[in-house]
Amino acid sequence: MPAAASAPAPVSAAVTVRVPAKVNAQLAVGGLRPDGFHDLANVFLAVGLYDEVTAAPADGLRITVSGPDAAHVPADDSNLAARAARALAERRGLRPDVHLHIAKDIPVAGGMAGGSADAAAALLACDTLWGGGTPREELLAICAELGSDVPFNLVGGAALGRGRGELLEPLEVGGTFHWVFAVAEGGLSTPAVYRECDRLRVAAGGGATTADVPDPRPDPALLEALRTGDTAALAAALTAGGSSNDLQAAAVSLRPSLARTLAAGTEAGALAALVSGSGPTCAFLVGDEAAAVAVADAMTASGTCRTARPTTAPAPGAHVVRRG
Ligand SMILES: C[C@@](CO)(OP(=O)(O)O)[C@H](O)COP(=O)(O)OP(=O)(O)OC[C@H]1O[C@@H](n2ccc(N)nc2=O)[C@H](O)[C@@H]1O
Ligand SMILES: Nc1ncnc2c1ncn2[C@@H]1O[C@H](COP(=O)(O)OP(=O)(O)O)[C@@H](O)[C@H]1O
């Protein structure tokens, strides 16, 4: 293999990409696969909490992080943004000479795909800094190698994720939905929550593998509610059969205090309450902006979360917001 070249003369001094968090409107979890992943029907919805990743030319690869949760984000090679820059540089035969600064606003280890978001943003920022031109399909393939959620963070909006979540079909959304996110103190480990889901299934008398668990399927009523922008219908679909999130029971089992957080949101007037992905962030669907502010205030006052953030969905995927 030829030696890696220095990065081409950058098109600008720095490129900043904004990238959204996500909530899983539905997370149907199939059985444990031989490769350690679970097949999913993952209805991703990008929400308006954002990280920004700035890529600037440097000698070697450097990571810095700012924001209230910065201390909980690794600033070394294990950072998903660093892994994204290395993966792209390797494909393009370049040295990963880049300083990545992550301005972090997405809760860390909160079930909102913050690390995946930074990986997608770093990929787009580096590609733009290094002259662009990597085909979208290739960027998506690199995203899928970095993690199951990363392709969705690149595309944003709403999408159905099949396979382990990386095989995306865009979904139509017919309106704006209002949400409040109750951010917990401390995170939950995604693999630990999947393991707990398997453990609970076995304890309930079933098995946990693909042979025992039915194929995960998207709920047609939930997809229709998204398509028509119908908040009441979405609330009904989110709570049908308890929760549209198959990881919710596992997250609550590992963090029993989440039951109180969910109840506090319902008491405050939320139309639906669910754990966001693997948690521990809890997501509350509300009717409008005024209700979002009221529920966020009530959640903060309830003492059942660290902070509460009102926002809307869908949000756009990773996109360049500044150059130079
Ligand atoms: C649960 C979800 C829901 O969108 O996200 P979070 O709520 O954590 O953000 C995702 O499935 C998380 O995706 P992501 O965080 O990208 O996971 P990956 O890095 O690909 O995998 C980390 C680990 O999670 C487990 N995993 C992940 C995806 C999947 N379909 N099945 C799994 O069992 C495996 O143990 C895997 O080793
Ligand atoms: N850029 C990053 N931002 C946040 N966490 C990161 C990042 N890179 C690696 N991590 C690691 O990934 C773990 C999961 O973080 P995150 O993606 O925010 O949560 P989740 O998988 O629950 O959505 C963190 O505990 C952290 O150690």
Image (spheres, helix red, strand yellow):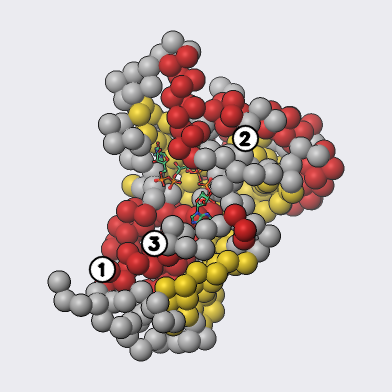
Q: Looking at the figure, which quarter contains the N terminus?
A: bottom left
Where does label 2 land, which residue?
274
Where does label 3 land, which residue?
83
**Can residue 267 be seen here?**
yes
Q: Earlier in the sequence, mark 1 or mark 2?
A: 1
Q: Amino acid at mark 3?
A: Arg
Q: Is residue 169 above or below residue 10?
A: above
Q: Amino acid at mark 1?
A: Arg
Whole-percent x, y for residue 298 in the image = 82, 42
Distance from mark 3 CB to nearest ligand 2 atom below 8 Å: yes
Whole-percent x, y for residue 53 in the image = 52, 69
Q: Amino acid at mark 2?
A: Leu
Whole-percent x, y for residue 14 in the image = 49, 82
Whole-percent x, y for residue 21 in the image = 55, 54
Residue occupying the point 43% across, 24% down: 198
**Callout 3: 10 Å neighbours few (<14), some, many (20+)?**
some
SS of the residue under disc 3? helix
Q: Is residue 83 above or below residue 291?
A: below
CA separation in Å, label 1 and label 2: 40 Å
Residue furthest to the left: 1
Mark 1 or mark 2, whichever is nearer to me? 1
Judging depth in this view, the residue of 178 and 88 nearest the camera is 88
- Say whether residue 183 is left or right of residue 303: left
Where does label 1 land, which residue?
91
**Callout 1: 10 Å neighbours few (<14), some, many (20+)?**
few
Residue occupying the point 65% across, 64% down: 67
Q: Earlier in the sequence, mark 1 or mark 3?
A: 3
